[in-house]
């Protein structure tokens, strides 16, 4: 963005009234907090570009263009940064730090995803009061339009839950405040406000959508109403029929927190940002992101892990020896398939999201048979992947563990697992969408070449 456009954005943002004026005793809402932050962030970006805008990230090669653009630094993502060895940091905070610092539910030990969303969006740790208000705000926005209910009810139960989720999220675009404001000719400097409103609506409606998909697909009758006093994870668990199990609700709080964001280059995050750059509203952008998440190399891997483990147990039994398990792993690789839940495009060590789930399991389900098998795989798979000599990272990722925890609590419908991932990933994708619009990020449009064009370009060099 040219600095003149940054300057004019700044002028308009400063003109946004201080929404909290006159309510000094009341904690600032998320939107009020953002309205105050945005002018400062615009200044910050301006300063970064003035100081470093002409500097180079380094060279990249033809191989990288053919190789899925690994390592090419070409995106801005504010909420989180992924270090190959250390793993994810949400606004500079590791997962254990988030577990320590973020507000929790009364009596709970895991961070509330509401708090993580606040952190992703603002870089600040919210107060308990702010988080409670955010839970109430999401609960108040939770109902879904009748036609979306009908749309979901019309889906055959054989339609994959992720396809149903994507359909429903796309359809929410019917009521997009951003799309409507755009049609009415809104000034681009105000884009972030309706993007924020749509994002809040989208997050808020996901528990009812997920619950309806789950109950339509697997049975369980009508879901109860959203509880205006409950936190987001409690409401989601209740919609799914697991709300009475406090441990499951705690698991959801952890799950929704750690799956939310993994910097910008992964398929779902990148897709959301790319589609949003065309000024598609948050519903359309997130639906596109969900379609990417539904791929087996990305979010569907958490379903695939359980499928793979179940097939293994069927073939070699429940308490198989290390030798038998090793044979099964080699059979998978020799059959030209991946071992799901292992490897990563960026990480080069055990994923701290895996570790966080392992610690949850050690605390709450240490004797679970499937958990023990996951531990056995952790001992065996990395050496085999190293010996096979292809995977750059032989260590487990987030998906290697999540299914086992869900299964422990009786949530055995693995085709649904990626929907939970999608609910969580929405927090990260929409956080960035809001900043994309606040910072006036342009249409994303990298340059591509054909193989013939590359040949011509370099054959004489
Ligand atoms: C995540 C993943 C897609 C990353 O892909 P990537 O960045 O291309 O990974 P690498 O550079 O290490 O891949 C190099 C080779 O090792 C293979 N490889 C990587 N992880 C592997 C795994 N878990 N099992 C078997 N082979 C694997 C790749 O398929 C590739 O093979 P190829 O050269 O024949 O195409 C990959 O590790 C994978 O498929 N993992 C299993 C699926 C999964 O768990 N996905 C969730 C990720 S959070």
Image: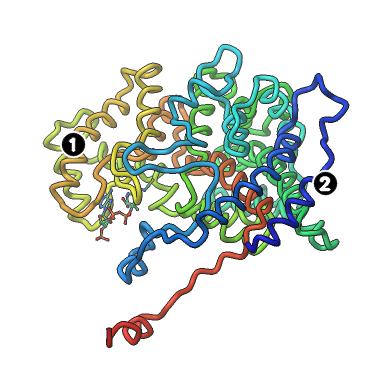
Q: Earlier in the sequence, mark 1 or mark 2?
A: 2
201 displayed left or right of 155: right
Identify the mark at residue 15; answer none if there is no mark: 2
Nearest the eye: 203 or 57:
57
From the viewer's perspective, is residue 262 above or below residue 76?
above
245 displayed left or right of 450: right
Residue displayed at 44% across by 40% down: 414
Residue displayed at 40% across by 22% down: 360
Instruction: Give x and y (percent) for residue 87.
Output: 38, 38
Name of the residue lying farthest toward the top: 107
Q: Which class describes the residues within 10 Å of circle 1: few (<14), some (14-19), or many (20+)?
A: some
Q: Is residue 403 visible?
A: yes
Residue displayed at 56% across by 60% down: 274
Front disc: 1 or 2: 2
Residue bearing the label numbered 1: 380
Identify the mark at residue 80; answer none if there is no mark: none
164 displayed left or right of 351: right
From the viewer's perspective, is residue 356 above or below residue 419?
above
Nearest the eye: 431 or 17:
17
Instruction: Give x and y (percent) for residue 13.
Output: 76, 48
Residue displayed at 35% across by 29% down: 355
Instruction: Give x and y (percent) for residue 233.
Output: 59, 28
Instruction: Give x and y (percent) for residue 255.
Output: 49, 32
Which element type, helix, strand or loop, lies under badge 2?
A: loop
Q: Is residue 159 visible?
A: no
Which element type, helix, strand or loop, lies under badge 1?
A: helix
Q: Are marks 1 and 2 in contact (CB under 8 Å)?
A: no
């Amino acid at each position: 963005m040219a600095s003149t456009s940054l300057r004019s954005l700044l002028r308009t943002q400063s003109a946004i009234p201080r929404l909290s004026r006159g309510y000094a005793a009341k904690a600032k809402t998320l939107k009020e907090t953002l309205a105050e932050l945005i002018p400062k962030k615009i200044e910050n970006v301006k300063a970064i570009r003035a100081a470093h805008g002409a500097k180079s990230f380094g060279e990249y090669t033809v191989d990288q263009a053919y190789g899925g653009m690994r390592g090419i630094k070409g995106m801005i993502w504010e909420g989180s940064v992924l270090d190959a060895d250390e793993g994810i940091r949400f606004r500079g905070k590791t997962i254990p730090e988030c577990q320590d610092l973020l507000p929790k539910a009364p009596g709970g030990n895991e961070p509330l995803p509401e708090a993580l969303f606040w952190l992703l969006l603002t870089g600040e740790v919210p107060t308990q009061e702010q988080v409670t208000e955010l839970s109430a705000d999401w609960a108040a926005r939770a109902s879904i339009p009748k036609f979306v209910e009908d749309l979901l009810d019309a889906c055959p139960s054989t339609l994959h839950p992720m396809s149903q989720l994507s359909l429903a999220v796309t359809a929410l675009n019917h009521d997009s405040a951003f799309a409507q404001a755009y049609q009415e000719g809104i000034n681009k400097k105000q884009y972030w406000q309706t993007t924020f409103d749509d994002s809040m609506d989208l997050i808020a409606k996901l528990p009812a959508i997920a619950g309806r998909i789950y109950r339509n697909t697997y049975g369980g009758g009508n879901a109860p109403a959203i509880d205006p006093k409950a936190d987001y994870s409690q409401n989601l668990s209740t919609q799914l029929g697991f709300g009475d199990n406090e441990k499951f609700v705690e698991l959801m709080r952890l799950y929704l927190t750690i799956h939310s964001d993994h910097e910008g280059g992964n398929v779902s995050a990148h897709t959301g940002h790319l589609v949003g750059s065309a000024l598609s509203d948050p519903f359309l952008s997130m639906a596109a992101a969900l379609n990417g998440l539904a791929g087996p190399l990305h979010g569907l891997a958490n379903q695939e892990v359980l499928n793979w483990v179940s097939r293994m147990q069927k073939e070699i039994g429940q308490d198989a020896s290390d030798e038998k398990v090793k044979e099964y792993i080699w059979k998978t690789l020799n059959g030209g398939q991946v071992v799901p839940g292992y490897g990563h495009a960026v990480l080069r060590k055990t994923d701290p999201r895996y570790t966080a789930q392992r610690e949850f399991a050690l605390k709450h389900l240490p004797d679970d048979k499937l958990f023990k098998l996951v531990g056995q795989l952790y001992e065996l798979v990395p050496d085999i992947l190293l010996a096979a000599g292809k995977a750059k990272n032989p260590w487990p990722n987030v998906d290697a563990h999540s299914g086992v925890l869900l299964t422990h609590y009786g949530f055995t419908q693995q085709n649904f697992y990626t929907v939970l991932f999608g609910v969580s990933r929405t927090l990260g994708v929409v956080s960035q969408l809001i900043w994309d619009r606040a910072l006036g990020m342009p249409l994303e449009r990298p340059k591509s070449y054909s193989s013939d064009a590359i040949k011509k370009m370099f054959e004489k060099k």
